[in-house]
Image (cartoon, helix red, strand yellow):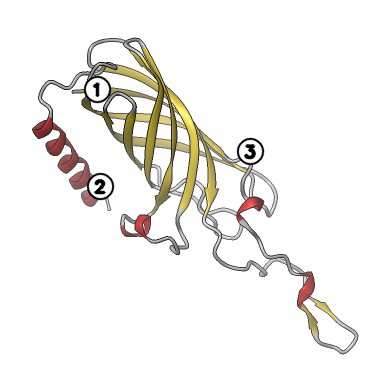
Amino acid sequence: MKTQTWTMMAAAALVVLGLGNEARADSTSLLTMGLGSSVGLSHVVPVTGGSVNDVVSELNVRIKMLKVLGFDFNYNMAGENPVGHGEIYASSLRASALLYLVPTRVVSVYLAAGTGSSEFTDMLKASASKRSYHGGGGMELYIGRHLALSTEFLMLVPQVDRVVVSSQPLKVDGNGSLDLSSLKTPTVKDYISADNFQVTFGLKWFF
């Protein structure tokens, strides 16, 4: 997994270097790439109750195009922690599309949305059980021509593709048969909550 991740990051770096030798870390650049890392915390409240906090430690590749568009790829070195019925909220691999609403020379504010998984191939499969989704925004503060501080807040949503009944009590009707009508089928809306989030702070070098 680590070898494959580093290979993908190196390939992305070569592509951007080949396309734009004069890319800079400011809003006037039509094409620029940033490499960096970030640390933070994820907080999840499973539908089964309780709460789970995990440390986030990410390697990051960010590509910015045409001043307002971007693509983000992150690898969480801390791994992922299934919660509740095995749902994955914060995936070890995460890809995001970015839209910069305030692209300036000093600070940039953006919206982000995307998907995550534990394997590259699962990101392309809508039915993959270990996928996750996220949405939110962030900010970049430029402290030099190439260096930027960043912070990001994302809401986390797991993939919901099966009926979870293992922890629900079964009832018997008057005929002695199992009454399945009381079992709840989870839907995506059951997992969308501001209580499920990830906050990170990082440093990026743009070129």
- Residue type (three-letter) at the residue carrying disc 2: Thr
Q: Residue 189 in the image: state x and y as whole percent.
A: 64, 51
**Distance of label 1 from label 3 (alpha carbons):** 31 Å
Q: Earlier in the sequence, mark 2 or mark 3?
A: 2
Quarter of the image holding residue 72?
top left
| Secondary structure of residue under mark 3 | loop
- Residue type (three-letter) at the residue carrying disc 1: Trp
**Distance of label 2 from label 1 (alpha carbons):** 19 Å
Q: Give the labeled residue for mark 3.
A: 195
- Residue type (three-letter) at the residue carrying disc 3: Asp
Q: Are marks 2 and 1 in contact (CB under 8 Å)?
A: no
Q: Which mark is residue 5?
A: 2
Asked whether 65 or 187 is in front, the reply is 65
**Residue occupying the point 36% across, 36% down:** 58
Residue 93 visible to the viewer? yes
Q: Which mark is residue 205?
A: 1
Q: Residues within 10 Å of mark 3 (few under 14, many from 20)?
A: some
In the displayed structure, 199 sits above or below 117; it is above
Quarter of the image holding residue 120?
bottom left
| Secondary structure of residue under mark 1 | strand
Q: Earlier in the sequence, mark 1 or mark 3?
A: 3
Q: Residue 33 in the image: state x and y as whole percent.
A: 22, 29
Pick the quarter of the image with the C terminus. top left
In the displayed structure, 78 sits above or below 48; it is above
Q: Residue 103 in the image: state x and y as whole percent.
A: 36, 18
**Distance of label 2 from label 3 (alpha carbons):** 30 Å
